[in-house]
Amino acid sequence: MSDTTHIPPHIGSLKLLTDHAVNVAADAKHLADQLRTHYAKALLKESFPDHTLAIFIRNWDEDRPSLLQLLSHGAGVDDIDLTDDEDAHLSSEQNKALAAAEHQIRLIGSDDDLINHLDPSDEEHSDWFEFQLPLGDD
């Protein structure tokens, strides 16, 4: 009777290398997502210095998040609702920063990964998940 639990050394080595590669890839993805988050935050802080919170949402029927609002708790500073055409007074540079920040957050991917880098909202919505990116100092 042959021993089916015995794995030849060359196959065992390949398994160890595969497991190591999977761990390295996961670590690299986590680091890349951290850098994407910091980059998005830096872009938004630079372009919107009076705003303190970016709100990203992912609709139930969509695969990728989008930037919904920039909020400020300061007196005299209006929140920016990016679904409202009235906020079309943004400069070209601000629009570029918004698009680049949104792209970086989209690259993070799944909701599980987003939760690792953005704050989930305490508010519940019927049509979307909400994620918050504080723009204050770390």
Image: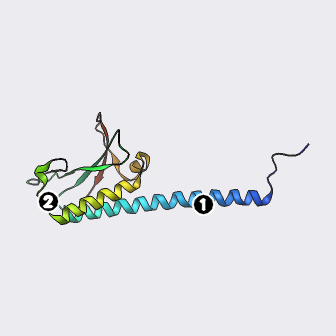
Residue 31 spot, x, y in % from top left: 45, 61
Is 4 on the left or on the right of 57, as rendered?
Answer: right
Quadrant where the C terminus is found in the figure: bottom left
Question: Which residue lies under the disc numbered 1?
Answer: 21
Q: What color scheme is it?
A: rainbow
Instruction: Name the kind of residue labelled 2 in the image.
Output: Leu
Mark 2 is surrounded, within 10 Å at the Cα level, by few (under 14), some (14 to 19) or many (20 or more) other residues, namely: few
Q: Is residue 91 visible?
A: yes
Query: Residue at image x 69%, y 56%?
Result: 15
Query: Residue at image x 13%, y 53%?
Result: 87
Mark 1 is surrounded, within 10 Å at the Cα level, by few (under 14), some (14 to 19) or many (20 or more) other residues, namely: few
Upstream in the sequence, badge 1 or badge 2?
1
Seen in the picture, residue 56 relative to 91 is either above or below; the reply is above
Residue 20 spot, x, y in % from top left: 62, 60
Is 2 on the left or on the right of 40, as rendered?
Answer: right
Where disc 1 sits, the SS reads helix
Quadrant where the N terminus is found in the figure: top right
Residue 34 spot, x, y in % from top left: 40, 60
Where disc 2 sits, the SS reads loop
Query: Residue at image x 86%, y 46%?
Result: 3
Q: Quadrant of residue 90?
A: bottom left
Question: Which residue lies under the disc numbered 2?
Answer: 90
Farthest top residue?
126
Viewer-closest of 94 and 24:
94
Q: Is residue 138 visible?
A: no
Is 7 on the left or on the right of 105, as rendered?
Answer: right
Is 99 on the left or on the right of 35, as rendered?
Answer: left
